[in-house]
Amino acid sequence: MADAGMLRFHVPEPEVRPGGTPDFSNVTIPKAGSVPRPEVNVDPRTIRDMAFSIIRVLNRAGEAVGPWAGLLTDEELLEGLRHMMTLRSFDARMQMAQRQGKTSFYMQHLGEEAVSCAFRKALQPGDMNFPTYRQAGLLIADGYPMVAMMNQIYSNEADPLKGRQLPIMYSSKEHGFFSISGNLATQYIQAVGWAMASAISNDSRIAAAWIGDGSTAESDFHAALVFASTYKAPVVLNVVNNQWAISTFQGIARGGSGTFAARGLGFGIPSLRVDGNDYLAVHAVAKWAIERARRNLGPTLVEYVTYRVGAHSSSDDPSAYRPKAESDAWPLGDPIIRLKNHLIHKQVWTEQRHIQAEAEILETVIAAQKEAESHGTLHAGGKPSTRDMFEGVYAETPPHLRRQRQQAGV
């Protein structure tokens, strides 16, 4: 047998590193409107190619074209634009607050606003999201109070979670927002379990699982796909591919599958890719996948192709691992600008009205921030009571915690 020589260890490398010229030539962008819309009850085996394409509705002229278009009214689109603008303004104020020392930590959604804002409008009351830390748009688009979100970020006396959670790890059963966990990927299999329980109890509510591209390398992701496919759980399995995990590019977690959507094919799960910066496309695909779940047709895996414009978190410096101008070269553009241009094309919006709306939204966000800060910030003002750490965990407080509470005098 011939000597094959020394073994070589392979480590995938991104197309470009800091200091280089951004390069997205490897991202194939299909023409808007070119991807067909299959029937909801389609046999997954007949649409395997959709795991390698990208569903798009908005073209470069701002027109909505193709079979996935036409599901939203002008009023619904204007509302969606305001939701995304509100989330971006909220982000900017909270990022500034973190830099001012008013909170310990923050994570922005910059460039990804369409994914969560559009998806939320496709759900029904009672459906449950199992989010990661970059889906606050699910709350914004459902009317959850910004003041409550800010109180949680500041961990002040009005924090609905009583200071028990890391900032931005919100929780609201009433708004279908399961408590965020810092342990990545755990929420994926929890979503499948919740969906299975809903089916077992003959309920009508479905679940939506959320995960980032990096966390698909976790074992919980694959376990969730096994259970979802085996038991046809009424769940939408969302993968937000924003090109970067904390500091590693998507190729590390993707492996040899080509796309993240392709991971679902081995489980017999219908798998689609959608332009995550196209509000109309995200909403249309979400409606399709949610209807499948609601009609007992089983899970759908959706990969949202988008880009994380900002840092991974307030603790991150992206210039250490990617070119500073890379976000400007992202070929799918800015979700807010694209929807704005579409509405201008439809003559229901103008540049002047957009500037006015930005000012109105900023004023609303600042007013909410002032109200939240009146209840305290990280280093000033009111704090949750010490006794809160002993409550809301056990139905009956165990002896050792009773002793600790007595020692604390609360």
Image: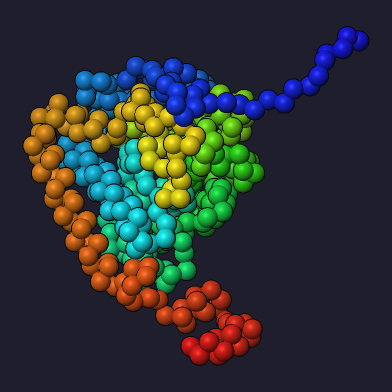
Q: Quadrant of residue 7?
A: top right
* Residue sitting at x 36%, y 44%: 109
Q: Quadrant of residue 117?
A: top left
Q: Is residue 303 left or right of residue 3?
A: left
Would you say residue 174 is visible in this rendering? no
Residue 240 image position (x, y, % from top left):
45, 38
Q: Nearer the viewer, residue 376 or 109?
A: 376
Colouring method of the image:
rainbow
Q: Residue furthest top?
A: 2
Q: Nearer the viewer, residue 144 or 314?
A: 314
Quadrant for the N terminus, please.
top right
Q: Is residue 67 left or right of residue 343?
A: right
Would you say residue 343 is visible in this rendering? yes
393 versus 187 height, above or below: below
* Residue sitting at x 53%, y 87%: 408
Q: Nearer the viewer, residue 257 or 268?
A: 257
190 versus 112 height, above or below: below
Q: Residue furthest front?
A: 19
Q: Residue furthest left?
A: 352
Residue 172 image position (x, y, % from top left):
39, 61
Residue 382 image position (x, y, % from top left):
34, 76
Q: Quadrant of residue 230?
A: top right
211 versus 272 height, above or below: below
* Residue sitting at x 36%, y 57%: 98
247 versus 369 height, above or below: above
* Residue sitting at x 32%, y 59%: 100
Q: Is residue 346 left or right of residue 64?
A: left
Please state the total of marks drawn on the protein image: 0
Residue 137 image position (x, y, % from top left):
33, 48
